[in-house]
Amino acid sequence: MAVDFVLPDLGEGIKAADVVKVLVKEGDTVAAGQTVLEVETDKAGLDVPCPVAGTVSKVLVKAGTKANVGAVMLVIEAGEAAATKPADPPAKAEALAAAVAAAAAIATAANATPEPAAAEAPAAPEPAKAAVSSDKTPVFASPSVRQFAREVGIDIRTVEGTGPGGRISVEDVKAAARNVGRLVPVAPAAGPDLPEFSRWGAIHVEPMNKVRRTAATYLSECWHTIPHVTIFDKCDVTALEAWRARLKPRADRAGVKITVTAILLKVLAKALKQFPKLNASLDIPGDQIVLKDHYHLGIAVDSERGLVVPVVRDVDRKSLFQVAKEMTDLADAGRRGKLAPNDMQGASFTLTNLGGLGIGYFTPVVPHPQVAILGVGRSVREPVWNEAAGAFEPRLMMPLSLSIDHRLVDGADGARFLRWIIDTVQEPLSLLEG
């Protein structure tokens, strides 16, 4: 039986993806769950598995092209004679569980080809839209949840699932309905036309990849929407580095590396509980402040494809070693382009560290809909006056740059928050309290 293998649903608001690699050719046998495509969305590289075993009779897509969700990628002659090699390990279990389930549902649906989506997903996050759902685009939701979404006028494809593998629940649909029309991003201006640079000399051009294009649009929106204020200070990390050195043997035995960034994530989780306004979002259309009781922290990661920001969830509930391990794994996946969309969603606060590049102070851009971001610079040994000893002594000083959304966070609030962080870091044993 011929089965049309379509590009499955890849996440909230994603209607298309760039095909990076086609890993099979006509005549190849494939096993159920075997990776057959590598695709790239706005900020995520994903391995796409085949939902059925069989022989590839047609390859309808090429590397370097764009494919809409629901478009036919391959035609598989399903049968028992297919290869039985084990499935490739998924890049991220949550995202691919949804992809496999969605693709399998399509493959068994009377061999019908879904209509492709009309347009590429917008680069910046968008709220749920009041629209009638279409079951022709695969989503990870039960029939009863789909029916509920239709009844309340929510397009099920715009709902972010919080269940296992991204499964959408009735509560997710209700949350989307409550957020209709709120936190709407402002489209940035395209900018003035460029001059003809070739008049002055040789040039060459290269296309923007999805990560850079998304970042350009999103950061323009953030900069034009949010009135930024950046507060600068230094933190004495001499005692912190000594404490980290003492932890190293135990961390080595546990197979983790305790970095300053991992420690700062734990400090930030405690600080945000003390200063909840910085763990919030400003809802102008709804005339309200959304205060978050969860502590999901984004970490900016430099990759060859551009900046990505994976999210370490529930930092307040995890040990320092757990946070360090998860942060390292996410950062590594980000550098390899293997982050799933869910890995980069839901941050309530972001940390960016340019210390490894030798940078001191800088002005990080607040990522909408968050209201603050902490920048960390390179620690430098400096002479610091010791009042008690009546002399200068060498201390390791770390630059900190806190950017805030001044619509919600006053300068004094930001200053108190930054000072709390500094005081805690300078007394690292306080991390073991509470």
Image (cartoon, grey):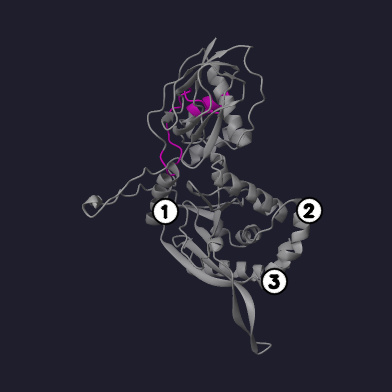
Q: Mark 1 points at which residue?
A: 222
Residue type at tag 3: Ala
Dot 3 or dot 1, earlier in sequence:
1
Q: In which quadrant is the C terminus drawn?
A: bottom right
As drawn, 322 above or below 74: below
The main secondary structure of the magenta stretch is loop
Q: Mark 3 points at which residue?
A: 239
Image x and y of residue 35, in percent:
58, 28
Point 61% across, 30% down: residue:
97
**Residue at the limit of the structure toward the bottom, as seen here:** 390
Verify whether residue 8 appears in magenta. Answer: no
Decide: few, some or many residues near mark 3? Use Cα within 10 Å; few <14, some 14-19, many ≥20.
some
Q: Is mark 3 on a helix, strand or loop?
A: helix
Q: Which of the two residues, 248 or 226, is positioned nearer the viewer here?
A: 248
What is the distance, in whole Å, between disc 2 and disc 1 at their CAs? Answer: 42 Å
CB under 8 Å between callouts 3 and 1? no
Q: Mark 2 points at which residue?
A: 253
Residue type at tag 2: Arg
Q: Which of the two residues, 371 or 207, is positioned nearer the viewer here?
A: 207
User: What range of the chain is rendered magenta?
Assistant: 122-150
Image x and y of residue 209, in percent:
42, 42
Residue type at tag 1: Cys
Q: Is mark 1 on a helix, strand or loop?
A: helix
**Is residue 141 visible in this depiction of the protein?**
no
Q: Which of the two residues, 198 or 319, is positioned nearer the viewer here?
A: 198
Verify whether residue 147 appears in magenta. Answer: yes
